Image (cartoon, rainbow, N blue to C red):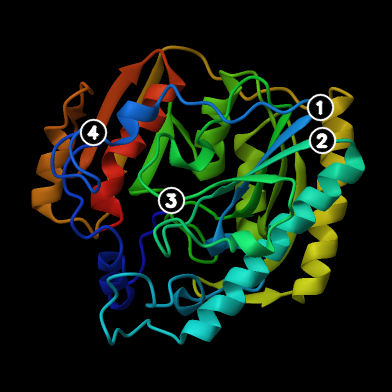
Amino acid sequence: MPMSFPRCTRPLLALLIASAVALPGQAGERGGPGTGPNVFQGKHLPFENGFRVYIVSNMAGMGAAVDMKEVMAGTEAGAPAQTNTASFADYEGRFRSLLTQEANAAVRGARLGGARSFVVGDAHPGNSFGNILPWELDSAVVLVRGFPRPIFMISGLDSTFGTLMFDGAVASAGSKGILPHTFGFDAFSVNGKPLNEVAISALIAGEMRVSVSMVAGDDAAIEETRAMLPNGFVGIITKYAVGRQAGITYSPVRVRQMIAAGAAEAVRREKAGAFAPFKMDKPYRVEFTVQSSMSDDVVGQIAAMSGFTLEKTGLRSFRFTTESARQIGYLIDAMQPWVTR
């Protein structure tokens, strides 16, 4: 997921999709004209029988990870030879392996709880949203990876899913969490209520009648998400923030045990009707501030985006109104080429 970090870490954002400066589906986007997310908005995941679970996997919020070198090691395609956040390929590989094992733990637990169909969405921009190691993944999993894609965090989600889970949630931009961020925003709210990445996705999923049943991440992420999602969920604190790039962490083995137990409980409670989809009153009055790391020129390009009626309310702030939560997701999609540059 896109992040805003101290200036010393920002050069690494240029590693990803450096040439993508056009809107999704327009000429200039990686892949050529007509190949962006707009073309694929109607796509669905292969249907599988049984209780279906969609697991969002985010490397920035995974257990033990606290530093940019662990989640964007500088070994991605197009990375400069030397950056002040670069690490060794084997170091990056170890964390990617741990991330994959966490996803497997969530699947294992969900299976014990009664789930029979599993989708994992790779939701972190390192390696162009290709962080999970497919060859280490549970063989029952359908994996969503790569970029760009529509509503990338929950691409392909639909009303046939029984629940939505988040492994590796992060606290919102400006918070006291580890590697805190909210997509490409310094602030984001709907109807005056601040929402983080989990809550924004939950609102979109809620329109599909899919509820969030599990959230795993640091203590700040769990605390703020509980305040945002009034219908509750199984919360798993995998680390405690003591700085924006420092934390008190559990061992990876214990984290996997916690995630598996939490996923099993989440599915059992979801099947018993314990959680309701997250909903807000329509129309949605969306207000956001573009993150400070973006240039004034990029802010101007965002203001001129087609397909959205954006009203500029400040130097970097906008608002718009919509009847569809999906439209919020499509706005985030449209901004991704700039956020991940």
Give the crowd class for mark 3: few <14, some 14-19, many >=20 residues within 10 Å.
Answer: some
Tag shown at residue 146: 3
Residue 14, picture quadrant = bottom left
Q: Secondary structure at mark 2?
A: loop
The residue that mark 2 highlights is 116
Under mark 3, the amino acid is Gly
The residue that mark 4 highlights is 25
Name the residue located 82 percent from the left edge and 40 percent from the top edge: 266
Residue 8, picture quadrant = bottom left
Give the crowd class for mark 4: few <14, some 14-19, many >=20 residues within 10 Å.
Answer: many
Under mark 1, the amino acid is Gly
Along the polypeptide, which appears first: circle 2 or circle 3?
Answer: 2
Name the residue located 72 percent from the left edge and 64 percent from the top edge: 101
Q: Is residue 100 visible?
A: yes
Give the crowd class for mark 2: few <14, some 14-19, many >=20 residues within 10 Å.
Answer: some
What whole-number distance in Å separates the C-alpha atoms at marks 1 and 3?
Answer: 27 Å
The residue that mark 1 highlights is 50
Under mark 2, the amino acid is Arg
Along the polypeptide, which appears first: circle 4 or circle 2?
Answer: 4
What whole-number distance in Å separates the C-alpha atoms at marks 1 and 4?
Answer: 35 Å
Q: Secondary structure at mark 3?
A: loop
Q: Secondary structure at mark 1?
A: loop
Is the residue under label 2 in contact with that under label 1 (CB below 8 Å)? yes
What whole-number distance in Å separates the C-alpha atoms at marks 4 and 2?
Answer: 35 Å
Q: Position of residue 17 (x, y in %)?
A: 27, 57
Q: Is residue 196 visible?
A: no
Q: Position of residue 290 (x, y in %)?
A: 26, 46
- Horizontal side of 82 relative to 209 (left or right) equals left
